[in-house]
Amino acid sequence: MFASVLFQVIMNILLLGSGGRECALAWKLSQSSHLHNLWIAPGNAGTAQYGSNVAIPENDFEAIRQLVIDNDINMIVVGPEAPLAAGIVDFFKKEPAISHIGIIGPSEHGAMLESSKDFAKGFMLRNNIPTAGYKTFTIADIPAAHDFIDSMHPPYVLKADGLAQGKGVVICDNADEAKQTLAEMLKNKKFGKASERVVIEEFLRGIELSIFVLTDGVNYLLLPAAKDYKRIGDDDTGLNTGGMGAVSPVNFADEVFMKKVEERILKPTILGIQKENIDYKGFIFFGLMNCNGDPYVIEYNVRLGDPETEAIIPRIENDFVEMFQKTLSGKLHEARIEISEKYAVTVILASGGYPGDYEKGFEINGFEKIKEALIFHAGTKKSDAGSILTNGGRVMAVTALGETLELCREYVYNEIEKIHFQGVYYRKDIGKDLLHFQPLE
Ligand code: AMP
Ligand code: GLY
């Protein structure tokens, strides 16, 4: 006992990001006995409860470097994809003064699994990982792209190659619409540089789920699965959003299905990372489609999902600092994931008008009355007078844990009633579709 206390490593940690995902990560990191100080850049009003917010944008590497040196920070946990895609890991590795700082997140090369759809598809092809058939086109190949569209069956899936804030995927019902969308992407640069290349792929029919692993590049820990609700309206209607709610576990991801996921997708992905010499110590998020019981990869992300994180982190019983230390030292095989059997349901409270235009700056009241749920702030800020104001489209994530999905839904929706701000909007059906789910054949 004495020895373990004596040798316990205490860390100063910097967490990058400002959403509900980062609030959940900050909450979890703050519970670790290995944490000394936590900084969050830039954070939100919620993360400030668990550490010190610093007003530095997550992609200002020079300012981050200075913060790390000035505060003797030992580890950086990267929440969103942008700093990873911009090469924060490589930036730190290059400089002797900071090259020893451990970063949870892949190198720029690894981040291409998210920042280039074409790279991700090529990686899957090379490593025999099931995904929709595809071809990639540039402005020079429009006639070939039209031939490809004509050879396919509708609907057609067109994806901007680069990062497009989750908006780069367009699903078209007929060939004319697909060709028009292609022209908008390639010729009119609908998504800027991100759509200089376009992946056209087969449409996969099935039910989606999100799978997460933490990897040291060789070993991996399988984290709880989650289902995300992306559309703004109940029953999956209306515009796509960043995500309006999440449920974990996913009851159709049974043992048989998960075995296929491990053998056909997770293991080949980690092996591919090794074979292709990709420096990767961080999370991988597999967006999967369950097509009649067979898993296919829709996309890779090189980070945790939001709002899935707000549903899965409360179910993970491990000490996150310990898990991250093992990740950085390449000893993840020594860790065992401990997951609570409870269900979790997360509902996002959004600003009225989101994902279109919305106003900010409304006072949020009542959340201090919440007893049966966890609150993770997303778009919030503290006013000079100390009240909490809305400051984004997705304002807060409310998560309830319970023995059953029914109970979680009851708790979370009862608690949400207590929270008020002008124009508050949330989906009423999170998890409803899974209540009586019959597993796929
Ligand atoms: P992504 O940005 O790649 O996650 O795509 C956004 C959404 O488009 C996904 O969550 C799916 O709902 C849908 N999607 C993407 N690719 C396909 C596909 N090949 N077949 C069917 N739906 C897809
Ligand atoms: N919830 C989906 C994402 O984080 O991309």
Image (cartoon, grey):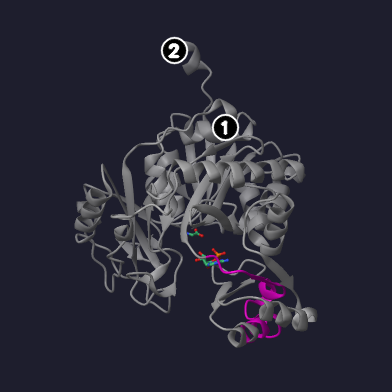
Q: Is residue 398 left or right of residue 276?
A: left
222 versus 87 height, above or below: above
Question: Residue 78 at what x, y percent from top left?
Answer: 57, 49
Picture quadrant of residue 315: top left
Q: Which residue is mark 2?
A: 1
| Disc 2 element | loop
Q: Is residue 193 left or right of residue 302?
A: right
392 versus 278 height, above or below: below
Q: Residues within 10 Å of mark 1 (few under 14, many from 20)?
A: many
Question: Residue 186 at what x, y percent from top left?
Answer: 70, 80
Q: What numbered label is drawn on residue 343? A: none
Q: Earlier in the sequence, mark 2 or mark 1?
A: 2
Residue at 47% over, 42% down = 256
- Under mark 1, the amino acid is Gln
- Residues 390 and 382: in front is 390
- Under mark 2, the amino acid is Met
The reply to whether the residue tagged 1 has its Cβ within 8 angstroms of ligand 2 is no
- What is the magenta range? 180-204
437 versus 339 height, above or below: below
66 versus 150 height, above or below: above
Q: What numbered label is drawn on residue 325? A: 1
